[in-house]
Image (spheres, rainbow, N blue to C red):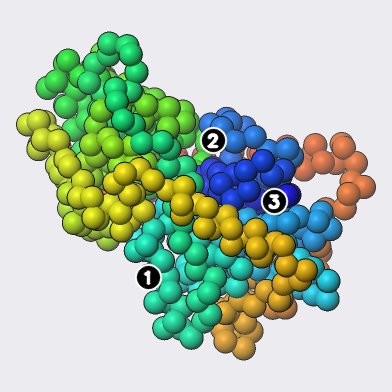
Amino acid sequence: MRIAVLADSDTRWKWGALTAHRLAPGARLDGRLLRGRATPTARQLGEVGVRAAEIGEVTGTEFVRTAGRDRYDVVVLACVGGAVQAMLHGLAAAWEGAPSRPVVVTGYVGVVYEKLADGLLLRHGADVVLANSPDDAGRFRAVYEGAGAETGCVTEWALPFLGERRTGPPDDQVRPYTVVFAAQPSVPESRADRGHLLRRAVAHARKHPEREVLIKLRSKPGEHTTHIEELPYQKLAARLPGGLPANCRLVYGHMGEVLDRTDLLVTVSSTAALESLHRGIPTAVLTDLGIREALGNHHFLGSGCLASWDQLDAGHVPEADPEWAARHGVPADGSGEAVFAAARQRVAELAALPSLPPLAPYYTPATAPGYLPAVLARHGLDHRGRPLPGRAGTAREESALRRAGRAALRDAARGAYRHGVQRVAPLIRRVGEL
């Protein structure tokens, strides 16, 4: 089996690549990175730990043009909702009249706590919309039913990066009790809130010198993730009076490897909390900044994981409610293979059919004439899903020198964009506050 994964950021590449691996172990995997501000770097790709037979950057129109010709069995769309909708329309137009087509799969990278209806309806039209838990599956079907959209595409699943449940000590080495603060690029957003969380993590390290406190960061300076990070913790840490204590440090790398040595995970609302719970690691979802939809920690109401740094400083160890965990895709016994197997069988059955009906997204020029055209245009497509004039994609015969020049220009543009986001924009906001 051949699978193409289209991803537009590091976390979505991780989800898409691991989803492909779970759906069809041993299949050939080709990676296609949607060109944009968050296109992952080589380091970010390597951190995922999944190898692709072939990987390269594409525009939306290039992907539409080549996806049918390359004869894939499955296409996984691991992108933001608008990009998924554009690709569904573009692929529907490209495959029009073809005797067969690939199975199209999409879903969400992690916890779905905002823009539920918007994101779901933008993903409607795929053959399979993966729901990461029984709770998500029910919510997804309710949205589609309420909109009068077909619900058979919703397929229960589990997050593909949930590792094996840890049943004993993480290793045989003598090491300190390790607390990991899993930072997020955009939650919280303000300098004051991010500074508070960093200072409290550092204070915890100073209060418990026998412990090791790791601040797990998503990206290095200059890299971008799914969400824009205007105030990287690296810069905030560099300005701390006295710096970081000896038992507190910044770390990068694969989350699974960091969790292998974790005794307590602390976060605001990161999907890392679900990975941690699945491994049986005590997990604290912080309430220091309130329990708010904007933070996403409201998703963990009833989980037993909500706690503040004050409580953690005093020795509190959260204990997750097993019923909540099971409803939200984290079975208490660590199982998950049965759910993976069910989705795997569904995709295999669809791929084995001699033909599939045309892709039929809920949004059409008739149902959303004031919304859909703009969504498609952002990805170089007209209202019928056809490439706009001049956006049909790069010709294969383009010279190596011209390709190199285009790549250098893109890198320079990304650098300018990141500089603007991380340096110029915060400065303008500060000046505006004077």
Considering only order in the chain, which callout, 2 or 1, is on the residue closer to the N terminus? 2
- Image mark for residue 48: 2
Q: Position of residue 268 (x, y in %)?
A: 27, 45
Q: Position of residue 135 (x, y in %)?
A: 34, 63
* Res 350 seen here: yes
Disc 2 or 3, which lies upstream in sequence? 3
- 276, above or below 135, in the image: above
Which residue appears at 65% of the width and 58% of the height? 348
Whether residue 426 appears in this view of the structure is no
* Label 3 SS: strand
Q: Residues within 10 Å of mark 2 (few under 14, many from 20)?
A: many
Q: Residues within 10 Å of mark 3 (few under 14, many from 20)?
A: many
Residue 145's x, y, as percent?
44, 82
158 vs 34, nearest the viewer: 158
The residue singled out by tag 1 in the image is 139
Q: Counting residues from the N terminus, which is met first, the one under dot 1 or under dot 3?
A: 3
Report whether 235 appears left or right of 58: left
Contact (Cβ within 8 Å) of mark 1 with mark 3: no
Q: Amino acid at mark 1?
A: Arg
- The foreground one among 424 and 27 is 27
Marks 2 and 3 sit apart, C-alpha to C-alpha, by 17 Å
Which disc number belongs to residue 417? none
Amino acid, disc 3: Ala
Q: Are marks 2 and 3 in contact (CB under 8 Å)?
A: no
Q: What distance separates the C-alpha of mark 1 from that of mark 2?
A: 29 Å
Quarter of the image for residue 62 reads bottom right
